[in-house]
Image (cartoon, helix red, strand yellow):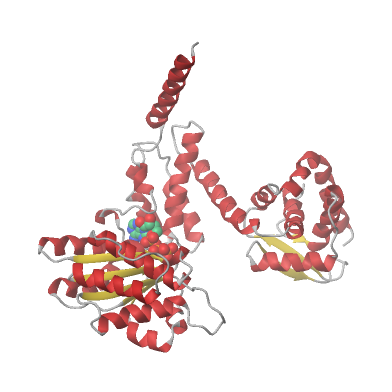
């Protein structure tokens, strides 16, 4: 076949596979499960009190008055961004219909590491909303000059505006010493002060969103008094509320592809994790993606369980990537004890795990650290919430020892750690490792 023909048939086969993927998918409108998408008002479940409060606070913007500043706090995934953005969106439409220029300037502080960068991003965002030039360079001028440009854009283009600072507590900035004022404190002071002093002509208020209930205590005194917000509290969702949230989005799937129990299982998993709606929606979507990947027409409970395992793996992987090889090896040796054990073992005795660790260091030709170092590494694993530990004395005849219980599935932990190139080699000796684990368990319990 000529090169041109070859390419044409390749492109046709890619196109065909893409079309087939869409036709065979369990999803009807996957966008409804996109965590960042603005959803329609009628898909918001509950949160009536928070909606009422925010509507009441923001209403003055429509009557030519300045709304109060607000502090929205509660754990992640409890609807803070959703609710404030939904109200602002409606306000924007109403303001437009009565000929007012209402501006909604949003800044997610999560990835911003300095006060100067935060100010510049505010200028960029305001310029985009007002459809004007940014007007200042990113570097080479002072932060004050950027701030002035921000006030100038707001004054010249909006009758009133709300500045939403999402994840505000993460905007720490580069502090030279621990007593320096954090960037969020400085920014809140400047924005609320500028509005009070009339440096911005329109009516501007600031809404700060945070997961930290002690956020106000960490604010500098002058920032606290000029920001002086109205609090709106968002509490965890329970399994029933999460279920209702998912039910309102179940049309993301094609009709009759959801087996009974999928929604309640996804909600139950998310409710265990402090009632995070983001987690519930994520599991609900991932279950469908797994069904698609496996070519299944129906989304079943085991897809949800696999999705839960996948997200545990993602979370664990991210946290574990930063550990040193010795720490990973200690944790790995501990995790494979329940995985390979032929008897049911919910907690892992440190004596058994340390002996498995010693065996692994020998197998992998790695340094062998002392038992004390192993215990220290495992203590650290406890602070990262990978395991909980309990001291056991007497009865076992082995003196005092510790027992570790894994928070996540130990199989997932072991699989995750096995992706480390130094540990990967264990896979080639699985049978041997399994027999060492069981010999050590037998030895330990027979010695009681
Ligand atoms: N009451 C609700 N009804 C419908 N969907 C919801 C509700 N609460 C949250 N969600 C959805 O859950 C996801 C997370 O919500 P949101 O981003 O508002 O949480 P958050 O409290 O701002 O979290 P974070 O503090 O982590 O930013 C979003 O996709 C949102 O649409």
Viewer-proximal residue among 100 and 85: 100
Query: In x, y percent, where is residue 330?
Result: 76, 58
Query: In x, y percent, where is residue 102?
Result: 20, 66
Q: Is residue 379 left or right of residue 283?
A: right
Say which quarter of the image contains residue 133.
bottom left
Say which quarter of the image contains residue 398.
bottom right
Viewer-proximal residue among 133 and 440: 133
Q: Residue furthest left?
A: 98
> What residue is shown at x 52% (from left), y 74% (from top)?
174
Badge count: 0
Q: Quadrant location of ligand 1?
A: bottom left
Q: Is residue 73 above or below residue 416?
A: below
Instruction: Judge whether residue 21 can be spotted in this image.
Output: yes
> What residue is shown at x 49% (from left), y 12% (from top)?
2
Q: Residue furthest top?
A: 1
Q: Is residue 7 above or below residue 78?
A: above
Say which quarter of the image contains residue 14.
top left
Viewer-proximal residue among 249 and 223: 223
Q: Is residue 344 above or below residue 298?
A: below
Instruction: Judge whether residue 80 can be spotted in this image.
Output: no
> What residue is shown at x 51% (from left), y 83% (from top)?
180
Query: In x, y percent, where is residue 46?
Result: 31, 62
Q: Residue furthest front?
A: 140
Q: Is residue 279 left or right of residue 147?
A: right
User: Which of the image's four quarters has the C terminus?
Assistant: bottom right
> What residue is shown at x 18% (from left), y 75% (from top)?
60
Q: Is residue 151 left or right of residue 180?
A: left
Q: Is residue 20 above or below residue 293?
A: above
Query: In x, y percent, where is residue 208?
Result: 36, 73
């Amino acid at each position: 076949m000529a090169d041109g023909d070859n390419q044409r048939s390749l492109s046709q086969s890619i196109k065909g596979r893409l079309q087939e993927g869409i036709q065979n998918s369990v999803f009807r409108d996957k966008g409804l499960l996109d965590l960042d998408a603005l959803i329609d008002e009628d898909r918001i479940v509950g949160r009536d009190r928070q909606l009422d409060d925010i509507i009441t606070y923001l209403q003055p913007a429509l009557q030519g008055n300045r709304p109060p500043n607000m502090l929205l706090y509660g754990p992640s995934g409890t609807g803070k961004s959703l609710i404030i953005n939904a109200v602002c969106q409606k306000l924007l439409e109403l303001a437009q219909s009565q000929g007012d220029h209402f501006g909604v300037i949003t800044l997610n502080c999560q990835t911003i590491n300095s006060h100067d960068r935060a100010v510049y991003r505010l200028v960029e965002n305001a310029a985009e909303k007002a459809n004007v030039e940014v007007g200042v360079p990113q570097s080479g001028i002072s932060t004050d000059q950027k701030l002035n440009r921000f006030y100038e854009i707001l004054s010249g283009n909006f009758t009133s505006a709300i500045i939403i600072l999402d994840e505000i507590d993460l905007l720490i900035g580069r502090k030279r010493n621990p007593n320096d004022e954090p960037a969020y404190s400085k920014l809140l002071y400047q924005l609320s002060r500028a509005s009070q002093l009339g440096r911005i002509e329109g009516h501007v208020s600031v809404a700060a969103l945070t997961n930290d209930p002690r956020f106000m205590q960490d604010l500098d005194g002058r920032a606290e008094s000029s920001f002086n917000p109205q609090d709106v509290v968002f509490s965890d969702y329970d399994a029933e509320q999460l279920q209702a949230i998912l039910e309102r989005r179940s049309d993301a799937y094609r009709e009759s592809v959801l087996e009974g129990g999928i929604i309640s299982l996804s909600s139950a998993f998310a409710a265990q994790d402090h009632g995070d709606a983001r987690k519930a929606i994520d599991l609900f979507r991932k279950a469908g993606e797994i069904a698609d990947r496996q070519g299944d027409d129906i989304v079943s409970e085991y897809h949800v369980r696999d999705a839960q395992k996948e997200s545990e793996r993602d979370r664990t992987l991210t946290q574990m990537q930063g550990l040193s090889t010795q720490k990973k090896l200690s944790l790995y040796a501990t995790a494979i004890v329940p995985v390979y054990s032929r008897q049911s073992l919910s907690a892992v005795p440190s004596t058994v795990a340390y002996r498995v660790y010693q065996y692994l260091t020998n197998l992998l030709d790695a340094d062998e650290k002392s038992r004390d170092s192993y215990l220290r590494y495992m203590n650290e694993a406890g602070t990262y919430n990978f395991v909980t530990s309990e001291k056991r004395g007497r009865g076992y005849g082995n003196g005092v020892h510790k027992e570790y219980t894994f928070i996540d599935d130990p199989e997932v932990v072991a699989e995750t750690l096995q992706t480390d190139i130094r540990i990967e080699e264990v896979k080639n000796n699985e049978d041997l490792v399994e027999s060492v684990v069981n010999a050590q368990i037998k030895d330990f319990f027979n010695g009681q």
